[in-house]
Image (tube, grey):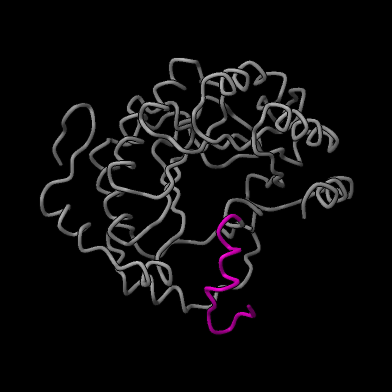
Amino acid sequence: MAKGNGSILANNSQQSVIDDAPGIFSRLRYSPFLAQLVIIRRCNLSCSYCSEYDKVSDPIPVEILGQRLWKLKSLGTFGISLTGGEPTLHPQLPDLIRKCRQLGFFRTGMISNGFLLRPELIKALNEAGLQEMQISIDGVEANDATQKVLSNLKKRLQWLREHARFRVVVSGVLGACPPHEAEEVLSFARQMGFIPRVLLLHDSNGQLKPSHGEVKTFEKIWCSQTRSVWSKSLMDYTRTDLREQFYQYKPCHATCTLGCARSTSQLDNWRTQPGFNS
């Protein structure tokens, strides 16, 4: 991999493979609609329910991330979401977003807790070409489980409204705070002009344990992501693997967290597979 103008440039052999990416009909049939790429495991918060971070890891080098982005693109992936840990801790985040846009992903987004957002960073993300940011907010007031609440994030959300040229999705999370606070989060998101949605909190083992009140609130607001163990490295994945996994029946998983997969699973209404009812 070679670097230039602050971004990663694919070498000629990699570019030739991207140019030879699967055609649109094959992509619509087998390729991932959305891939999440962890760019750093470290996080600035320590939410008690979260198991997807640490306090010691260095940012993943941009050379390695560039290779993974190229691989995802060569498999025909439509959208990419940069995640962590906390992605804004990666010192070259704008360069990585710029690389995603150079590779031609149809949608380039990221997931953040929002705490490190400042007008300067938001403007840098604009210039890099970010298209969507998702922020999950656990409630209104902080408690022993979380600091990721509206009272701590209102100023950052106001900066997003003032400066962001990308779409902002705010998720009210049920499980870490009193259920009615999720409704207040979603109401605030609508007032700010953001896209609201609701999520259910999982514990450190990936399990859902909503209370009766949380279930009722969830049904009132909106009523899925399946955790799976990858058996093959991304860099070894092929189009044959995509087809094989497409036709592999996958039942609901015990640790489903009802998360991001719902945004793409609706397409299975027409991308049917044997063993599934359309």
Q: Quadrant of the N terminus?
A: top left
Residue at (39% x, 75% y) in the render: 243
Does the magenta-highlighted stretch encompass residue 271?
Answer: yes
The image quarter in which residue 134 lies: top right
Residue 75 as seen in the image, left or right of residue 56: left
| Relative image position of residue 79 (x, y in whole percent) | 43, 51
The image quarter in which residue 94 lies: top left
| Relative image position of residue 93 (x, y in whole percent) | 37, 30
The correct choice, above or below, for 137 with respect to 250 in the image is above
Q: Nearer the viewer, residue 117 or 165?
A: 165
The correct choice, above or below, for 36 with respect to 141 in the image is below
Residue at (42% x, 48% y) in the render: 80
- The region drawn magenta spans 263-278
| Relative image position of residue 2 (x, y in whole percent) | 13, 37
Residue at (16% x, 53% y) in the render: 14
Does the magenta-highlighted stretch encompass residue 217?
Answer: no
The image quarter in which residue 169 lies: top right
Q: Quadrant of the C terminus?
A: bottom right
Residue 19 as seen in the image, left or right of residue 48: left
| Relative image position of residue 175 (x, y in whole percent) | 76, 41
Residue 13 as seen in the image, left or right of residue 255: left
Q: Count the labels in the image.
A: 0
